[in-house]
Amino acid sequence: MEEYLIKDGKRLRLGYTTGSCAAAAAKAAAWMLLTGRKKDTIRLQTPKGIELNLKVLDIQMLADEARCAIQKDSGDDPDVTRGTLIFAAVKRSDKSGVTIDGGEGVGRVTKPGLDVPRQMIEENVREVCALVGYDGGIDVTISAPEGEALAKKTFNPRLGIEGGISILGTTGIVEPMSEQALVDTIHVELRQRRANGADYVLLTPGNYGADFIRASIGLDPRTAVLTSNFIGDA
């Protein structure tokens, strides 16, 4: 991807989210399943308005299923999922519409307050169906074989995402701002607390604060939201 932004006088390359990878892989797999023709690249219009032209990898075309992957590119953002392959496997279904599920290495959202880009995946699969004149059902399974190991290096367990990496990103684009990414994560966790009915929240900068909460207040530090240096934003 060759889109950039300027931050603090530096030219930083944008990337694309796991959600964009999943949508693009599903779109390419749907095309190959319904046309029987191989697809080496796929175009994806992101919700942010930026069009991606992505290379399709690890293609498998079977009689009743097509499977392929898109490689995650986080641009100049320090993201542990950089280079990860996000797969989509697509089959025809007896059910109407597009059914989306998570497979190996894709985390399950166990708390409300997270936006999973199901709409982006569904819209791109429906676009292919309309293009080829297919009006039946489609099953889509998204997977990330490295996801479970990578998830241990992320905020996912605190955000209620279990078993793998998150398929997130409502804009479809990663902006290389590591500080902003942390602030956004704090905001997501705060929204989740509200969605779960909390009318107050405990904030702590980090591990020292968590130890104080445990030793002096007698509360489980997992009930607190970690803010690092962004207590004002929180």
Image: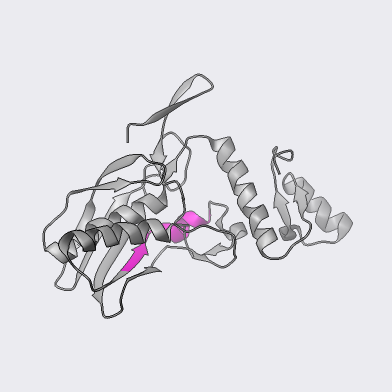
Residue found at the very far right of the displayed protein: 216
Colour convention? one colour
Residue under the image location 64 percent in, 48 percent down: 186
Tell me the quadrant of the picture where the C terminus can be found. top right
Residue 112 x/y as whole percent: 59, 64
Let me know if residue 85 appears in the view.
no
Nearer to me, 117 or 218? 117
Let me know if residue 213 appears in the view.
yes
Lateral position of residue 30 relative to residue 47, left or right: left
Residue under the image location 85 percent in, 56 percent down: 215
Q: Is residue 72 above or below residue 120?
A: above
Residue 58 x/y as whole percent: 22, 56
Residue found at the very far top of the displayed protein: 9
Nearer to me, 170 or 81? 170
The magenta segment is 140-152
Residue 77 x/y as whole percent: 47, 37
Q: Is residue 127 above or below residue 227?
A: below
